[in-house]
Structures are given as structure tokens and as C-alpha cells.
Amino acid sequence: MDPEKETVKQLENEAITAVKGAASGSEDSLADFDWTEEEETIVRRKIDWHTVPLVTLLYMLCFLDRINIGNARIQGMGTDLNLYGTRFSWAASIFYIIYLLVEVPSNVLLKYIGARYYLPLLVFGFGFVSMCTAFVTTFEGLMGARSVLGIFEGGAMPGMAFFLSCFYKRNELLFRIGIYVSAASIAGAFGGLLATGLSLIPPWGVASMRIHTWRNIFFFEGIITIIIGLAAPIWMPTAPKDAWFLNERERRIATERLLREHRASPDEKVTWADVKRAVFCIHNYTCAMCFFLINITVQGLSVFLPTILADLGWSNTKAQLYSVPPYVAACAVAVAVAYASDKTKQRGIYLAVFSLIALAGFAILRWVEQPNIRYMGVFFVTIGAFPGGPGFLSWALNNSAGPSVRAVTSGYVVMLGTMGGIVATWTYQPFDAPKYYIGHSINLAGQAAVFCLSIFGIFYCMYENRVRAAGKRDHRLEGLTEEQAQDLGYRHPRFHYYT
């Protein structure tokens, strides 16, 4: 028999044995249950319509409530709250400090509570905090509001990524994560337009607290988020096995197609072994470091782009409006890259190539003087950098085995990556205006490092796959029961890395 076919057959038998009886309480064994490709396509499309649009909307609100501080800054908040010197950077960075501390614990809670109520709770929470920020009158109050905002938003991105990973196969995941993370660029585009409109609302409220300009931005965006957060549980499922929009057979198909691929029960609990397996994975460090560097760019632009454009000599309103097109382009490219990556089952090569585009953009911003050419450089940066967030997160999740390990991995990788957001808040300082040589140089070096790490990740995964195909990792199975062998996760000799 062809060795490759023999290996595939062996993997199928192992999968069937590992998950036999685990799905849906059915009396039939997994080996006796089958479905057609057409049925699976119908199930996947139903899942698409009931998960991806909702998660995309929720993450757009998450990102909108995070970055509106940048829009508010040039609409008078900096003057009203005396955000002189490094105060604005501290207000921005305290959010990320709290954010990264809660990511892993939040995903563990998500695994126990379930996504249907936990994720909407987070959305309601950060919407309420955003609304309350409209009533802040001091720098200290702003610091407190941003700290609480970090608590609620910290679990959103890794939680939504883990939520989607519970519904999709490895080769389906990046496209869906790419769509929902592209909500960040949608929020960047929509945020500029929305901030412009809301800031023009005439002052209103009681005499002791007039809501105007930048306060309108926080208040109304917060109200919108609260309403959607309260309504989200009506639509959101928790897991394939109890998806309300599927019939009994479709729920079983949705559950068992993942069991056969991941070779683990979705109901398994998070253990310390799962935490160690995620923390000590070399590939996770590669993805996390790249996510860290990408975040310096993405989060930095999200907060400072209106300021950077205003420093080109444009009015505040023009700067807000001109921040829209780069985000629209970034959204379209990020989704297209995710689609192509899933179709080709390749991750690293796309991430490496697009990091070079971002690098070219920062080179333009660093050394070119003409405003219009520098604005073109902003397009290069957003197009090159924004596909990296979903790309590196998906790459890490693809190469993690078992729902519990993926839950820890998503929180852990995003936690380390979020440190880039802290650095981002200090890259563009007032003393470096209007050219921002330091900020652009930091990001240029960061994108060069992303390229190098992406190439390393490709070769590391290729090396591991070759070694395992040659049987040089089979010693890991010696003396193990079948259940213990399945618990090896990505260390299992039959586990194949995505490159």
C-alpha cells in the first residue's frame, strides 16, 4: 500500500477509536456514523451565518470602544482633561497592561461558563464603561475608566477566536478569524466617520455636565454597544452540539467532524497539563512574538493615525475622514489573504510577504517628505500589517491540539501579543511630531523582524513534519496507553503542522 495512504488510514482509525461514543450521546459508534460532503457543506454554511457575522459585529464594537480615545483626543479631550506630556500615552497604555493580565484567565472562564452568555457579558461591560467615559472630568478618572475597560476587553479577542475554533476545522479557521478580526479595520474606518458625525451634535445634558464633541463619541458608541451586548445571547450558540439553528443530525455532523480532526472531546476541562503544553510550545512563541510586533503597528495606528494625519497639515475633520480609506483597503486585503491562506493551507508565506509591504510603507513614512506620498505609505502599512493579526493567531490555533489547549493558546498568544499594544502607546510622542521619525523607525524594524520570524516558523514546521514522517518522534508513544497518546496533542508523532 502507498505509505501516505497507509498513514492517512492509520490516522482515521486512531481518530475513530479516540472519540468513539463521545459525540451527542448517540448509541451508535462513530465508526458507524457518516455523512456526505454536501451535508457537511450545508452545516458549515449554517454555522457561518449564525456565528461569523455576530462575532464580527461584537469585535467591531470592541475595537471601536478601544480606539475612540484617539478620535476623542483631536476633538478636544486632550485640552479638557489636560493630557499634556506623556499623559495620553499613560491613558492608552494602562488599558493594555490590564488587558494582557486578564486574557488567559478570561478564556478559562469562557471554557467553563460558555460563550453564549460570557462573551455578550464582556460586550455589555465594555460598552457600559465607554458610555461612562463621557462623564470623566480628570486625567485620574480617565485612567480608571481605561483600566476597567481593559478588564472587559481583555477576554474578547482570544475568547472570540476560541469560540470560532470550536466550530471549524483547521483549514476553515483562518478565513473566519480573518473576517472577524477585519472588524478592527472596519472599526477604524467607521470610527473616523462616526466620530466626525457625533462630535458635531450640539451640546446637551444638565448644566453641571454638558455632553459635547468628544463626550458624544464615548456616550453614543457606548449606548450602541450595550444594546447589542444585551441582544447577543438570543442569536449566539455555545457549541456545535447544542446549536439551536441545526437539527439533531446536523448537530451530530457538526460535532463529530471536529472530533475526527482534533481527536479530542470538546467537553474536556482545562488542566495544568494543557496550560504547560500551550506555554512550552516553540511555535506559539514564534506566533506570539510576531503578534507582538504586528500589534505595535496595528494598535499604534489605531490610536495615533488621526494625530499623524492631522500633523500632515490637515484639519481635524479632514484627518478623521482621511483615516477611513486605509482601513477599508486593509479590511478587503485581510479577508482576501485569509481566504487564500485557507484554500492553500499555508500560513507563513502570506504573513512573510505582507510584512514586506508594511515595511515598505514605513520606509516611505520615515524618509519621504511629500504629504500625499506619505499618505500612500499609510495604505501600504495597513494593507501589509492588518492581515498579520488573524494570520498569526490562526497559525497558533491550527498547530494546537485539543479544545482545552486551544483555549489556553488563544489567550496566551494574544496576551503576549498585547504587550505590543503597550509599546505602541509610546511610539508616537509629541516631541517627535510632525515627522515621527522614532515611531516609524521602531515599526520599520518590527516589520523586518516579523518577516524573519515568519520564515523561521515556516522552516520549523517543515522540519518537524519531516522528522515525524520519518518516524523519529515515534519514541514519544512508548509505554503510553491509547488515551495518554491522544493527550500528547501537538507532540503526537502523527500530528501534522500547518506551515
Image: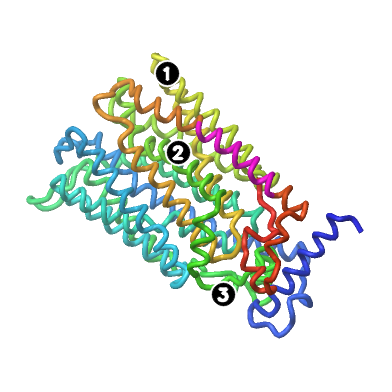
In the rendered view, does 356 fall on the left or right side of 149?
right
Q: Residue furthest bottom?
A: 27
Pointer 1 or 3: first along the chain: 3
Q: Which residue is mark 3?
A: 242
Residue 183: % across, % down: 47, 47
Q: Image quadrant of residue 19?
A: bottom right
Calculate the distance from the C-alpha at mark 2 to the C-alpha at mark 3.
Answer: 38 Å
Stretch in magenta: 449-464
Q: Amino acid at mark 1?
A: Asn
Secondary structure predominantly adopted by residues drawn in magenta: helix
* Label 2 close to label 1 by CB (< 8 Å): no
Pointer 2 or 1: first along the chain: 2
In the rendered view, does 347 fall on the left or right side of 159?
right
Calculate the distance from the C-alpha at mark 2 to the C-alpha at mark 1.
Answer: 26 Å
Residue 95: % across, % down: 30, 49
Q: Amino acid at mark 2?
A: Leu
Pointer 2 or 3: first along the chain: 3
Q: Which residue is mark 1?
A: 372
Labelled disc at residue 215: none
Calculate the distance from the C-alpha at mark 1 to the C-alpha at mark 3.
Answer: 53 Å
Q: Amino acid at mark 3?
A: Asp
Q: Secondary structure at mark 1?
A: helix
Q: Secondary structure at mark 2?
A: helix
Residue 363: % across, % down: 46, 21
